Image (tube, rainbow, N blue to C red):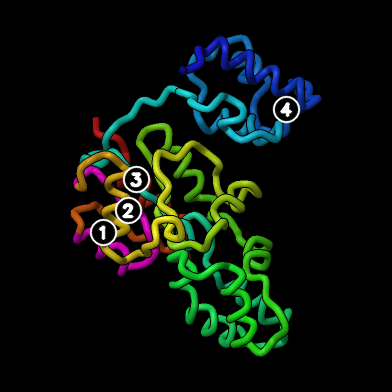
């Protein structure tokens, strides 16, 4: 059952008090104005954005679902873009966070091997672990064996170095208030949840999350796009994929989707190009 706005404000207030925070302290942690928080708590703001509520949840140490209940209905004025898009899928690596190169370099330094050797070994096994047919443990063992080192903990290395692409994460939050949004990513088991917990990815209520390791398919295989379309619940001509890999975009386009390439080497320019393209229809 959806919570009314007064009830939501009360829940936020109780969560703040349970965390031992004053309104001023919560405002500092969540980067909110004092007047905004007080209006939300007393119910004067009737439909706080998902981004605002998520910021409060993070500040009090809760997930979005824990804060507002298992079935929150936060107001969204769902729209379509000028090209008819109503659902936007975002890639993760190379789109919402920077790609693996820094982790390759860190691992190479830690084990006194070349970054090229790490990258070559990584790609040798990456598809299998991202499909979920190889465990993280097996991946680490095979990577270590191929590099000639005692042990490797790729997940630890990656999570310690992963860096958000702030321009695109801000755009994701903006889009989530206007359209349905989801993640469509080739990724290893457990990494998405870990990235959300540590704040590397926005921990919002995505309308769909397609984790390759859970659906046993990777981009650009047709199966993963079929699964993503079914989860989106709309026709292909209403779906947009934003991705940094041309092959993934070509496969999505073949499925009838709209596509946009993201250049993580020029995040300001690329994010602005996407924002211009997904402006709501008048």
Q: Give the vertical position of 78 relative to 166 (above or below).
A: above
Left or right of 260 on screen, residue 62: right
Q: Do the residues labelled 1 and 4 touch (CB within 8 Å)?
A: no
Q: Main secondary structure of the magenta part?
A: helix
Left or right of 171 on screen, residue 114: right
Q: Are marks 4 and 2 in contact (CB under 8 Å)?
A: no
Can residue 269 be seen from the camera position used here? no
Residue 242 within the segment the image draws in magenta:
yes
- Number of other residues with Cα within 10 Å of mark 1, as a class: few under 14, some 14 to 19, many 20 or more: many
Can residue 144 be seen from the camera position used here? yes
- Number of other residues with Cα within 10 Å of mark 2, as a class: few under 14, some 14 to 19, many 20 or more: many
- Residue that carries the numbered disc 3 in the rendered image: 88
Residue 146 within the segment the image draws in magenta:
no
| Pick the front one: 251 or 226 | 226
Q: Where is residue 159 in the image (x, y as percent from the top left)?
A: 64, 61
Inter-mark Cα distance, 1 to 3: 12 Å
- Number of other residues with Cα within 10 Å of mark 4, as a class: few under 14, some 14 to 19, many 20 or more: many
Q: Which of marks 3 and 2 is nearer the N terminus?
A: 3
- Residue that carries the numbered disc 2 in the rendered image: 241
Which numbered tag is attached to residue 42? Answer: none
Q: Earlier in the sequence, mark 2 or mark 1?
A: 2
Q: Earlier in the sequence, mark 4 or mark 3?
A: 4
- Residue that carries the numbered disc 1 in the rendered image: 252
| Pick the front one: 134 or 37 | 134
- Residue that carries the numbered disc 4 in the rendered image: 26
At a point 72% along the width and 87% down the height, the residue shown is 112
Q: Earlier in the sequence, mark 1 or mark 3?
A: 3
Q: What stretch is highlighted in magenta?
A: 237-254
At a point 56% along the width and 24% down the height, the residue shown is 69
**Residue 262 quadrant:** bottom left
């Amino acid at each position: 059952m959806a919570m009314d706005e007064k009830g939501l404000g009360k829940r936020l207030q109780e969560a703040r008090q349970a965390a031992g925070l004053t309104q001023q302290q919560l405002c500092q942690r969540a980067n909110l104005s004092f007047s905004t928080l007080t209006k939300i708590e007393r119910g004067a703001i009737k439909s706080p954005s998902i981004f605002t509520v998520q910021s409060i949840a993070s500040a009090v140490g809760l997930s979005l679902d824990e804060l507002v209940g298992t079935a929150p209905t936060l107001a969204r004025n769902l729209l379509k873009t000028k090209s008819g898009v109503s659902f936007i899928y975002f890639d993760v690596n190379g789109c919402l966070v920077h790609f693996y190169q820094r982790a390759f370099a860190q691992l190479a330094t830690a084990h006194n091997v070349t970054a090229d050797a790490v990258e070559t070994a990584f790609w040798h096994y990456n598809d299998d672990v991202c499909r979920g047919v190889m465990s993280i443990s097996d991946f680490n063992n095979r990577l270590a064996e191929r590099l000639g080192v005692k042990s490797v903990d790729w997940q630890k290395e990656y999570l310690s170095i992963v860096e958000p692409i702030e321009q695109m994460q801000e755009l994701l939050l903006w889009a989530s208030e206007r359209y349905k949004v989801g993640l469509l990513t080739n990724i290893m088991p457990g990494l998405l949840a870990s990235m959300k917990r540590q704040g590397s990815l926005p921990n919002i209520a995505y309308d769909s999350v397609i984790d390759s390791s859970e659906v046993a398919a990777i981009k650009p295989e047709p199966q993963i796009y079929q699964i993503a379309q079914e989860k989106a619940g709309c026709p292909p001509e209403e779906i947009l994929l934003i991705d940094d890999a041309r092959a993934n975009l070509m496969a999505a386009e073949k499925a009838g989707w709209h596509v946009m390439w993201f250049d993580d080497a020029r995040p300001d320019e690329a994010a602005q190009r996407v924002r211009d393209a997904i402006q709501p229809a008048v």
